[in-house]
Amino acid sequence: MESKVFFTDLRSKMGSGLLEKMAKLTGKMGLKSLIEPGDLVAVKLHFGEPGNLAYIRPPYVRRMVQMIKDAGGKPFLTDANTLYVGGRSNSVDHLESAIMNGFDYAVCGAPLIIADGLTGKDYVKVPIPGRHFKEVNIGSAAVHADAIICMTHFKCHELSGIGGAIKNLGMGLGSRSGKQQMHSDVLPVVDDNTCTGCAKCTRWCPAEAMETQPWPGNKKGQKAHILDNKCWGCGECAVTCTFGAIRPSWRTTPAAMQEKMAEYALGAVQGKAGKIGYINFLMDVSPECDCYSHNDAPIVADIGMLASTDPVALDQACVDLVNNRPVLPTSLIGDLPAGQDKFKAVHPGIDWEPTLVHAEAIGLGTRKYKLIEV
């Protein structure tokens, strides 16, 4: 059975600007039917790493916030902290980065709440029927919200091939330890020369797999040590260490990471049937994720906006629209012959399909869609 995906291009005229077109698009999706009066509505965004300019423009978010308020909802802007060290790995830096990029209350009209708390430890273990996971660590603000509106800048990605609604939902709402689980199939490691021996990691380890050993290399005379026979790779130690001494392991296959990401997306939607809407922005389709502190030239010209209540159908439609457009000659793949998959050309050896195949298999949606122009 096909899912409906609504599409509008970026042509505009007096009285029908892009904000009005977005409002009409989400109206066709049924935005008001997703929100009941008094609902706490999480507007899931990627606030953009400082220096990156490809993220969704804040005026679109402000218009969405107003539509949610008009429907009786109480919106807040949210994202979870990053696993890598950068401008968004804790709530203080994350909020500063968001405000720097224009996502403050004065512009968007809604408060900002980082989904997994100050240091990424504020999450809920959500049971799911997954192949890789039976429970996933989802940022508590998203779990406790009544509804979610997922606004996504659709682009390429170096591990998942595409960065669409499923990635925004799964990787984006997974806590820092959840991100470690998605990215790694092996255990974290301790850098003996960086460890200060503070022992914070031993207090946070849920598996009691951390201990301290004598070590004359620092002033405390001890260092952290991971008991491999007890460690299950949750990543709590890596996100607890403020000195960067416990490194998350990034070794995994892209396909495995994509499947795990889809399962985290499934966890993010649990208990919210009929309460989630998705809108993808096919603008500035950059070669890499918005997590970088820069953005390269887009690979195709701006295409439009798409909305659906099915994230799988939505992402599939976006892939098809991008691949059906001519490549921009000034881009990274400017010499790509017509008819070739642009996402696989940007990141050779990375196949984007496992995300959608697995998401469909676990019941997150369908790849079959009907594109309805608004």
Image (cartoon, helix red, strand yellow):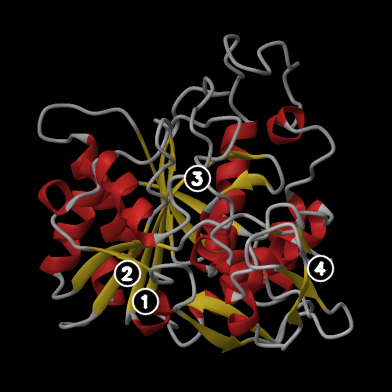
Residue 240's spot in the image, x, y percent?
56, 69
Front disc: 3 or 1: 3
Q: Disc number at residue 86? A: 3
User: How busy is the neighbourhood of tag 2: few (under 14 within 10 Å), some, or many (20 plus)?
Assistant: many
Identified by mark 2, the residue type is Ala
Tell me which numbered mark, 4 or 1, is placed earlier along the sequence. 1
* Contact between labelled residues 1 and 4, with CB atoms less than 8 Å apart: no
Foreground label between 2 and 1: 1
Give the CA distance from mark 4 to mark 3.
22 Å
Badge 4 marks a residue whose secondary structure is: loop
Q: Mark 3 to mark 1: distance in Å?
A: 22 Å
Which residue is drawn at the image coordinates 45% and 83% (left, top)? 273
Residue 123 to residue 296: above or below: below
Report the front residue among 130 and 104: 104
Residue type of the residue flagged with mark 4: Leu
Real-space Cα separation, disc 2 to disc 1, in angstroms: 8 Å
Q: Is residue 313 above or below residue 34?
A: above
Residue 284 drawn above or below residue 4: above
Q: Residue under label 2, please give it.
A: 42
Mark 3 vs mark 2: in front:
3
Which three-letter amino acid code belongs to the residue tagged 1? Answer: Ala
Between 49 and 219, the residue placed more toward the observer is: 219
Q: Residue at x 77, y 66 (%)?
A: 215
Instruction: Tell me whether circle 4 and circle 2 mark residues in contact (CB < 8 Å).
Output: no
Q: Quickly name the residue at label 4.
A: 187
Q: Return the mark for residue 188.
A: none
Residue occupying image coordinates x 57% and y 52% = 315
Residue 71 quadrant? bottom left
The alpha-carbon separation of the residues under discs 4 and 2 comes to 33 Å
Residue 41 x/y as whole percent: 28, 73
